[in-house]
Image (tube, rainbow, N blue to C red):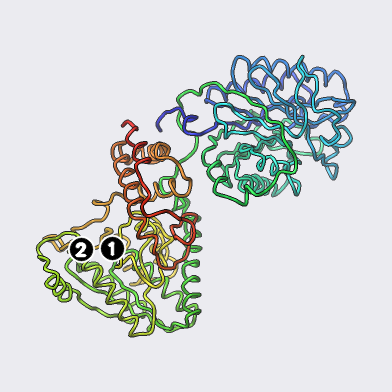
């Protein structure tokens, strides 16, 4: 993977550490913290989060009352303060801190040779195995907003946020263990107040089933807060008098686990995550519900700086197929859910208008096949006879025997009514009417065929008292790779929310899960057929001569670009950066940049086709309906985006 200055692309590298430690052995614990911090620094890390009460150990019990323990804790914090002066990183360490005659369970934030702030724990568990109120007071009981620590007057309280000067969108909010498990965690208020990186210093004992619950808690809080959530938990070096600690530390971003540590290891475990601050910022900008959530308290914002990060590879995976889960079991579940969304949407529309017949054009390609499968299942759910599906295959100048044979066979196998109508004579008459030379294979030659097919479908629908089912997919809409008022138009488009890279998997999933025998064989052959509009004559061998991706570019690239541009609103520079990470083993930089430029040009110039889309269901996080997710003027200028692309060097 390419090495780069990832901070310049809006990433903040942090680590969670479950360190080897001993109860009340502060010298040993401090050594382990320093060692972990230096390891993290070598990995280009800006911030390291350590467990709750990591300096002393969580299980000290009444030793927390010992003045020698508290005094040595302060001295060790002073040593850590000096470390950050030389290493230029931010450490967040757990320690017991006395203030105003009370003892607090605290997170100490250290950076640049200073203690930036001390955050006391708010919610102290005092049931079952927990007995924290015996030793500690809640943040709500503090008597001052400052305390004297290691020779400095330091901000003290649960109202502190920490902002990185060089990356203003990176704002850190801190809570401690139980704070994150209550019904209304402080991190929610911190997020609304601007925190994009939420950290939790924890000592969470392990019991049966708690690992998955903890993971779900971290994931859901990061998603709810549109933030990163870093959870550092104490390991098995904690006291085993009554409990076992596993050191299960995690980093999540907006509902996705980026990294987690190995459990039950006595040695120090570090998990790293490159948090995408740009992504989080953009998510918040477009979510007015998040912005409307008012923080119930004000916060003091403390700024810090981090050293320039070394050129390192991005420490997070970049999925080259963001619409398609890599895990096969998850992919199957994904396909099942999408197929159910499509069939439910169509069934609702048919039920609402009282239609018992539909018309659909079948080419033997992927899109029309998926639309037919959806229609068949919708009819089954409504208890309608499949013979009410009028499936029309309309061979023309570019139709091959393979696609025509698959189309006719599939229609028959599924029990729909099959009609075969050649468009050759009608299109030739049209050429004669408009004075077009049939030997000139230009855009008129191609689009006349597409529009003739749509006219047939619309008129047959009038005859049958039904509606035309659209077959075009999300990728074609993004690129405008559809003929205006031809395959672009229908009365209900069931595939409008499904990108091309996913269509193939959906058809294959149907072949494996819902059908068998000859039907499955035909579906698998359709999946193996190159994507083509078949508007130009076949080659001498009778094979497809017009392969879509040779002209418009690889759909896997365009779907990747679509996801980054529309879902995450990333700038061209960052989209290109991510493409280089994802496709390093598939395409060179010049190829990536070429098709990215094509994507932007087509995406802007073809908005007019999306502005008048038929109804159709949204099935994923990216949709282009002008009534829903994407409102864009058809005459918007693309130059700003192209200028940024032209400034990139390959």
Quadrant into which the C terminus falls: top left
- State how many labels appear: 2
SS category of the residue bearing label 2? helix
**Residue name at image x 38 percent, y 69 percent:** 371
Percent of width and height locating residue 71:
82, 18
SS category of the residue bearing label 1? loop
- Horizontal placement of 274 versus 98: left or right? left
Percent of width and height locating residue 312:
46, 27
Front position in the image: 578 or 34: 578
Quadrant into which the N terminus falls: top left
* Residue highlighted by disc 1: 483
Establish if 43 lies above or below 564.
above
Query: Who comes first in sequence, dot 2 or dot 1?
Result: 2
**Residue name at image x 37 percent, y 80 percent:** 389
Q: How crowded is mark 1: few (under 14 residues within 10 Å), some or many (20 or more)?
A: some
The reply to whether callout 2 and callout 1 are in contact (CB within 8 Å) is yes
Percent of width and height locating residue 278:
52, 38
* Residue highlighted by disc 2: 446
Front position in the image: 233 or 458: 458
């Amino acid at each position: 993977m390419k090495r780069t200055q990832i901070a310049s692309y809006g990433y903040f590298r942090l680590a969670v550490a479950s360190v080897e430690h001993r109860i009340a052995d502060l010298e040993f614990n401090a050594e382990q913290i320093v060692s972990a911090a230096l390891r993290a620094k070598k990995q280009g890390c800006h911030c390291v989060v350590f467990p709750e009460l990591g300096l002393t150990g969580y299980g000290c019990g009444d030793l927390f009352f010992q003045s020698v323990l508290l005094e040595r804790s302060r001295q060790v914090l002073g040593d850590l303060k000096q470390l950050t002066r030389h290493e230029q990183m931010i450490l967040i360490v757990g320690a017991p801190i006395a203030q105003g005659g009370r003892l607090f369970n605290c997170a100490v934030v250290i950076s640049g040779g200073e203690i930036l702030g001390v955050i006391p724990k708010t919610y102290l568990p005092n049931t079952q195995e927990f007995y924290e109120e015996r030793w500690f007071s809640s943040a709500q009981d503090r008597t001052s907003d400052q305390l004297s620590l290691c020779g400095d007057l330091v901000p003290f309280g649960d109202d502190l946020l920490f902002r990185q000067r060089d990356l203003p969108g990176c704002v850190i909010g801190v809570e401690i263990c139980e704070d994150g498990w209550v019904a209304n965690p402080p991190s929610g208020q911190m997020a609304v107040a601007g925190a994009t990186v939420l950290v939790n210093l924890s000592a969470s004992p392990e019991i049966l089933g708690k690992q998955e619950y903890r993971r779900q808690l971290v994931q859901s809080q990061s998603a709810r807060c549109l933030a990163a959530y870093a959870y550092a938990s104490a390991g098995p070096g904690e006291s085993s008098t009554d409990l076992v600690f596993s050191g299960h530390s995690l980093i999540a971003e907006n509902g996705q686990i980026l990294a987690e540590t190995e459990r039950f290891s006595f040695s120090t475990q570090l998990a790293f995550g490159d948090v995408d601050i740009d992504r989080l910022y953009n998510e918040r900008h477009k979510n007015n519900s998040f912005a409307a959530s008012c923080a119930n308290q004000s916060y003091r914002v403390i700024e810090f700086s981090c050293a320039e990060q070394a050129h390192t590879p991005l420490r997070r995976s970049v999925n080259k197929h963001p619409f398609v889960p890599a895990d096969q079991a998850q992919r199957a579940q994904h396909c099942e859910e999408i197929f159910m969304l499509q069939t439910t949407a169509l069934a609702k529309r048919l039920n609402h208008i009282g239609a018992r017949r539909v018309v659909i054009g079948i080419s033997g390609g992927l899109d029309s096949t998926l639309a037919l499968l959806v229609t068949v299942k919708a009819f089954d759910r409504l208890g309608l006879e499949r013979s009410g599906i009028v499936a029309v295959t309309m061979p023309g100048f570019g139709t091959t025997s393979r696609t025509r044979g698959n189309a006719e066979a599939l229609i028959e196998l599924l029990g729909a009514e099959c009609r075969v109508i050649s468009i050759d004579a009608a299109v030739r008459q049209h050429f004669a009417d408009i004075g077009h030379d049939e030997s000139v294979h230009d855009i008129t030659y191609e689009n006349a065929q597409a529009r003739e097919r749509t006219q047939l479908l619309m008129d047959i629908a009038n005859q049958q008292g039904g509606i035309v089912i659209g077959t075009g997919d999300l990728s074609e809409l993004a690129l405008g790779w559809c003929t205006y008022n031809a395959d672009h138009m229908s009365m209900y488009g069931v595939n409008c929310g499904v990108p091309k890279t996913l269509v193939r998997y959906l058809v294959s999933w149907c072949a494996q899960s819902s059908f068998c025998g000859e039907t499955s064989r035909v579906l698998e052959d359709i999946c193996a057929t190159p994507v083509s509009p078949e508007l130009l004559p076949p080659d001498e061998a009778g094979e497809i001569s017009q392969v879509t991706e040779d002209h418009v570019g690889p759909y896997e690239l365009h779907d990747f670009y679509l996801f980054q541009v529309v879902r995450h609103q990333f700038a061209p520079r960052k989209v290109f950066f991510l493409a280089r990470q994802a496709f390093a083993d598939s395409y060179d930089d010049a190829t990536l940049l070429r098709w990215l430029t094509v994507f932007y040009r087509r995406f802007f110039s073809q908005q007019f086709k999306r502005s008048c889309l038929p109804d159709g269901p949204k099935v994923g996080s990216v949709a282009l309906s002008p009534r829903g997710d994407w409102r864009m003027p058809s005459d918007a200028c693309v130059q700003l985006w192209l200028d940024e692309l032209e400034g990139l060097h390959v």
